[in-house]
Image (cartoon, rainbow, N blue to C red):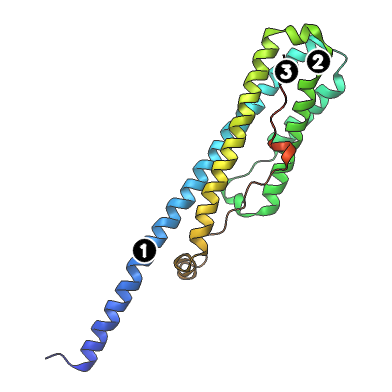
Amino acid sequence: MTSAPMRFLFALFAVCLLAFVPSCHKYDQLVADDATCDARWADIQAQLQRRADLVPNLVATVKGSAAHEEKVLSEVADARAKATSIQLSADDLTDPDKVAAFQKAQGELSKSLGRLIAVQESYPDLKANAQFQGLQVQLEGTENRVARAREQYNDAAREYNTELNKLGGKAVNQVTGKTFKPRAYFQADAAAQTAPTVSF
């Protein structure tokens, strides 16, 4: 026959075990959700890099046909330089100020690209240039991919932040010393989300 202290210790052990198992699952869930956020952010970075790589080709093509548009070309080059100079790591996505600065730079690039695309209306030779048309199509596709990647990142961040704010997530964070931090959402303004108009 077991003594009362032994029964108490056994019950205490059982309670601790019951509390520990869900905590391990919740920890694993947070790790998985955090990794998904990182993967979605990498998708955004890949699309933004693709866009940055297209810009010099687009600018060079416009230079040949629209030499008088130096101001627009300079704005695009400056916006690209600024957008590519602001780098965010996955760790930076927990800092809303860094995310806002990144979004602003990317938004300026989108606006300047929109102005550059509009230039083709004034130049029939440029409008008929097959290379320019091909670059426009690629750029439009890239803008759409960027918008989709942002949506997917925000979905992943929402799932992660939701798990983090649940009771189990808060408990895991308390035990681990706030290992997991909330992710900032990508909240670009409406103009930055709109792909440049392509018209032939």
Q: Quick one: 186 or 12, which is closer to the camera? A: 186
Mark 2: which secondary structure? Answer: helix
Q: Amino acid at mark 1?
A: Cys
Q: Quick one: 3 or 160, which is closer to the camera? A: 160
Pointer 3 residue:
199
Using residue 135 as the reference point, say whether residue 171 is left or right of it: left
Using residue 171 as the reference point, say whether residue 66 is left or right of it: right
Label located before the other in sequence (3 or 1): 1
Q: Amino acid at mark 2?
A: Glu
Using residue 157 as the reference point, say whether residue 8 is left or right of it: left
The crowd level at tag 2 (other Cα within 10 Å; few <14, some 14-19, many 20+) is few
- Alpha carbon distance from label 3 to label 2: 8 Å
Q: Position of residue 92 (x, y in %)?
A: 61, 50
Q: Amino acid at mark 3?
A: Ser
Using residue 62 as the reference point, say whether residue 34 is left or right of it: left
Q: In this view of the protein, can residue 179 be seen by the observer?
A: no
Mark 1: which secondary structure? Answer: helix
The residue located at (57%, 51%) in the rendering is 91
The residue located at (46%, 52%) in the rendering is 33
Q: Position of residue 35 (x, y in %)?
A: 47, 48
Q: Quick one: 98 or 118, which is closer to the camera? A: 118
Q: Are marks 3 and 2 in contact (CB under 8 Å)?
A: yes
- Alpha carbon distance from label 2 to label 1: 60 Å
Q: For the C terminus, which image quadrant? A: top right
Q: Position of residue 80 (x, y in %)?
A: 73, 30
Pointer 2 residue:
121
Label located before the other in sequence (2 or 1): 1
- From this view, report whether residue 84 is shown above or below residue 134: below
**Image depth: mark 2 or mark 1 in front:** 2
Pointer 1 residue:
24
**Image depth: mark 3 or mark 1 in front:** 3
Mark count: 3
